[in-house]
Image: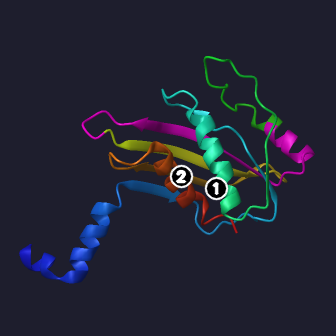
Amino acid sequence: MKTLLAHPVLRLMCLITFLSGCAVTDRVPERTASAEARWAVLTLENTTTTPMAGARAEAVARALLHTLGVKEVVRPPAPARDALFDPAPAADTDAAINWARSAGVRYLLTGTVDEWQYKVGVDGEPAVGLALHIIDVEDGSTLWTGVGARTGWGRDSLAAVAQTLIKSLLAPVVR
């Protein structure tokens, strides 16, 4: 082992692995969606115990689409909300697609937040897990799906970890 770590390239690889935190992502390869088209982002379904995690993830995704070059991201009509609870899951995808068609939207970003918390422990590392789907409004099909989870270090913020994860999922598909 000592001789392996003596090699500078292997030492660098170990350091990069150590510093990168833990992340796992899977996505549909080689699919793209036009940045020139009109997009909308639905509030992501929140399956966590963290209030409003879906709305937080939606806000990050909407802002990141702009930074990735999407020209126009419109807001769908606000769902009926209870002041104490998250909005109901976006179970009526057909209604969202119909609204998107009438609003001239080409792509609808939706998904689920599965983890959005600071882990319990000495360092309280932030942890985010989510699944994203891009629906092609023209035919109602799912154009792309990506899923990922990421943790940060105790000094990282939950928002920064979420932003890094969402960007790593969306960047390859938005062109």
Q: Which residues are magenta?
A: 96-123
**Above/below status of 104 relative to 16:** above
Q: Nearer the viewer, residue 50 or 108?
A: 50
- The answer to whether residue 61 is left or right of residue 100 is left
Q: Position of residue 43 (x, y in %)?
A: 67, 37
Between discs 1 and 2, the one toward the N terminus: 1
Name the outermost residue toward the left.
2
Residue 143: x %, y % from top left: 70, 57
- At numbered mark 2, what does the secondary structure look like: helix, strand or loop? helix
Type of amino acid under label 1: Leu
Whether 29 is drawn above or below 110: the answer is below
Q: CA distance from mark 1 to mark 2?
A: 8 Å
Q: Quadrant of the N terminus?
A: bottom left
The residue at 78%/31% (across/down) is: 78
Residue reaching furthest to the right: 102
Q: Quadrant of residue 18?
A: bottom left
**Which amino acid type is marked by label 2?**
Gln
Q: How many numbered marks, from 0 up?
A: 2
Q: Is residue 147 left or right of residue 134?
A: left
Q: Position of residue 86 (x, y in %)?
A: 62, 25
Q: Is residue 103 magenta?
A: yes
**Residue with the mark numbered 2:** 163
Q: Which residue is mark 1?
A: 64
| Discs 1, 2 touching: Cβ within 8 Å | yes
Q: Quadrant of the C terminus?
A: bottom right
Q: Is 63 or 116 nearer to us in this picture?
A: 63
Left or right: 149, with 45 as reference point: left
Check if residue 152 falls in the magenta segment: no
* Badge 1 density bin: few <14, some 14–19, many ≥20, Cα 10 Å: some
Rendering coords of residue 159 (x, y %): 50, 45
Depth check: 51 or 3 in front?
51
